[in-house]
Image (spheres, rainbow, N blue to C red):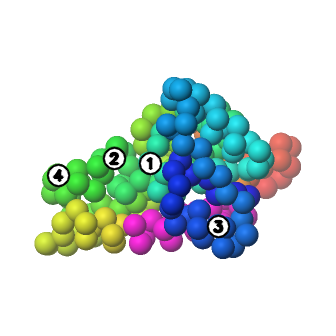
Amino acid sequence: MAVGADRDGIEGLDRAERAGVPTFVERVPDHPAREAWDLAIADRIAEYKPDLVVCAGFMKILGEPTLSAFPVLNTHPALLPSFPGAHGVRDALAHGVRVTGCTVMLADAGVDTGPIIAQEAVRVYDGDDEHTLHERIKAVERGLLVETVGRMAREGWTVTGRTARFGRPRDVGRAG
């Protein structure tokens, strides 16, 4: 287990260090091109032999070297497939939705297009602005992410096409 980041000075690194969890930083500007960073971050992650890579507040799109080597869990502050991209909360408010929420998904090569693992709704209140709504979504998102990672670790998961489910595949030929 380790905590990695693309920049120094973030709370996640500090928390990990206080807990004795190894940390690393792989900064994009330290590489001659984005493709070189993609390879470097995949190599750094591989050093820890993870079963699952969990992105939390990581606002970079991971490249093919990481996505092809590991299952990558990511979150988004909207109920996908609605309002993908960096401004999901702002876009939901501009659209006038009365309910939005958060999504936990497996990352793929697209932007917020991977198979959905879990979602939770958050009501939009009259008078909400982007900040107040985003803060409420983040509180729900944190809990949903922890719950989802726990279930994935305990129960496993399968993906068929775009459908992700908790649980391990049944043994072939075994009654169930």
The disc label shown at residue 86, or none: 2
- The residue that disc 4 covers is 95
CB atoms of marks 1 and 2 within 8 Å: yes
Q: Secondary structure at mark 4?
A: helix
Amino acid type at mark 1: Met
Is 171 displayed left or right of 39 in the figure?
right
Amino acid type at mark 2: Ala
Q: Which residues are magenta?
A: 138-155
CB atoms of marks 1 and 4 within 8 Å: no
Please indicate, yes or no, whether residue 155 appears anywhere in the rendered image: no
Q: Residue at x 64, y 44 (%)?
A: 71
Q: Earlier in the sequence, mark 1 or mark 3?
A: 3
In this view, the mark in front (1 or 3): 3
Amino acid type at mark 3: Ala
Q: Earlier in the sequence, mark 4 or mark 2?
A: 2
| Residue 143 belongs to magenta span | yes
Q: Residue at x 18, y 70 (%)?
A: 128
CB atoms of marks 4 and 2 within 8 Å: no
- The residue that disc 1 covers is 59
User: How far is the residue under mark 2 from the one under mark 3?
Assistant: 26 Å
In this view, the mark in front (1 or 4): 1
Is 164 displayed left or right of 70 in the figure?
left
- The residue that disc 3 covers is 16
User: How far is the residue under mark 1 from the one under mark 4?
Assistant: 23 Å
In this view, the mark in front (4 or 2): 2
Q: Earlier in the sequence, mark 1 or mark 4?
A: 1
Q: Nearer the viewer, residue 63 or 174?
A: 63
Q: Earlier in the sequence, mark 1 or mark 2?
A: 1
Sort mark 2 into few (<14), some (14-19) or many (20+) by Cα contacts within 10 Å.
few
| Residue 93 belongs to magenta span | no
User: How far is the residue under mark 4 from the one under mark 3?
Assistant: 38 Å
